[in-house]
Amino acid sequence: MLQCPVLQCYEIEVQEAGPLIRLRMVAIPLTATCPACVQPSARIHSRYRRRLADLPWANIPVLIEVSVRRFFCDNPGCARRIFSERLNTIAAPWARRTQRLADTQSKIGIVAGGSAGANLCQTLGCPAQGDLLLGLLHSLVLPEAPIPRVLGVDDWAKRKGQSYGTILVDHERECVIELLPDRTPETLADWLRDHPGIEIVTRDRAEAYAQGIREGAPQALQVADRWHLPKNLAEAVTKIFHDHQRAIQQQFSQVGSLAEPTGATPPTQPNASIAETQAIPAVSAAASPAAIEENPDRLTRADQQRRQRAAEAHALRQQGWTIKAIARHLDCHPKTIRRYLQRQLPLTPRRSTRATKLDAFKRYLLERWNAGCHNASQLFREIQPKGYGGSVTLVRTHAVALRRASGLAPASRQPGGRVVAPEEMRRPPTCRHLAWLTAQSADALDEADQAALSRVSQVSPNLRTTVEMAQQFAAMVCQRQPDDFDEWLDQAARSGLTAFRSFAKGLRSDYDAVRAALTLIYSNGRTEGHVNRLKCLKRQMYGRGGLELLRRRMMAI
């Protein structure tokens, strides 16, 4: 017989149809304790059979049938006359599964969620519906986390652009301790008042969080996130570069111009490394901004609408309209109208920066083109065995760009034309990419990146000042040189560049937190990592569970 401190197994039955392993057990103790008055009793009233699902054996479900006894309560002062014996170490009262199976299914629900967890349980031999797993999660008792010494604060999107919450992370224990339902300063301040003793709080540059920390934990030292400092710098530099966009494009569209830099890449362009290492269709003289101005038919309908809205926004602004009134009139977001007003007219056409299936084969196509093969269908047939899975249309479109760069007639397929250098088939870098390069430390840039920034500096004295000051600030952040911070702020205020003055004004308003970021080792990187994990869980749940379920899954892992 199999025996444990509470139960004794007297029969094992294996059912091939199913399959199923059935264990029949009886309780061993001679007495039981009344759950109401805690008085033991040995007088048996009756018996009944209780069925409990248990962990599977070799992926075969296991069912335990226990003969449970009912006892008389002999305590005259107890309200209960009859009670059932408890199997507390095996299963909870009225439960239909053992405690160890419930714990296992709870962990599966934490990691995989409802539907995915149900599929996993079915595979493992302990079937459970998604609703059951979610119920186990909601009944889970979360451990109380100690008050952190170093707290990380950041926002996360419940529904992007509409509603947001706040995540709180213990930096030293590296775990999530709470999810707040919104990102208002009042909610954060209330939580901080209920959890006194926090010494350091890392956050982004949001004023709402700064205010909430000042109200809820005035003794805590605020530390701005170091990643956001170069990001905010790049945003300011982008505005300056946009004002000189035509001159920058002309500088890079000259014959023999440099390729797009391959060093640092803005974090919101995950496929940029593919596009940068391969040849990209050129913006040749026929497709330059000046040529487009002379030939407006080349503009796409979206670019034409964008230019028309920008012109209307400038005209209404000159008439004294507010930005919100213009946004309502043109049915745009106020941020879009503000960007229109910050840039000169006419706006330059947008360019697509998405990677295509042809990118990996453009170097080969360029070699074959220079060798004299100008037939797009032939080129398409040659790259198919090499793994190209796209359409022939992409090849023909690229052949048009190659034909234009070679100086051939539009419909010509005959050999001839000049040899096209790889640099001619690469687009000039965007203003945003160049701005991100200026926000990097000079040691992190390769020769091509440094040469690109040198070209930008040659466009005008204002751009030279912009590049120099941006690189100084980037070096100050990377090398943590707080002694140069005040001098840089004064220099930015005297620069005469509106974007830099605004950037420096924002840094002065958050002076203590920014200086702490340049001095201390703490930053908000760990918090951002947990935000990424939260996004994965939220999308895995398909919006079903709500904030409480998401909170439990984040805090229980």
Image (cartoon, rainbow, N blue to C red):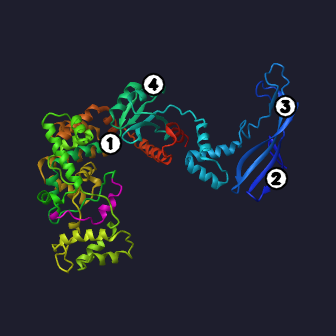
Q: Secondary structure at mark 3?
A: strand
Instruction: Pinpoint residue 107: horizontal percent, then vertical percent.
Output: 60, 45
Residue 526 shown in magenta? no
Q: CA distance from mark 3 to mark 1?
A: 68 Å
Image height check: is 262 above or below 441?
below
| Residue position marked by numbered label 4 in the rendering | 193
Q: Residues within 10 Å of mark 3 (few under 14, many from 20)?
A: many
- How many numbered discs, if any? 4
| Residue position marked by numbered label 3 in the rendering | 71
Instruction: Pinpoint residue 373: horizontal percent, then vertical percent.
Output: 25, 79
As rendered, which of 29 and 351 lies closer to the eye?
351
Quarter of the image holding residue 331? top left
Q: Earlier in the sequence, mark 3 or mark 1?
A: 3
Q: Residue at x 11, y 59 (%)?
A: 294
Horizontal side of 489 relative to 81 (left or right) equals left
| Residue position marked by numbered label 1 in the rendering | 228
Quarter of the image holding residue 418? bottom left
Instruction: Pinpoint residue 539: horizontal percent, then vertical percent.
Output: 47, 47
Identify the disc placed on residue 363.
Answer: none
Identify the disc placed on residue 12.
Answer: 2
Residue 279 shown in magenta? yes
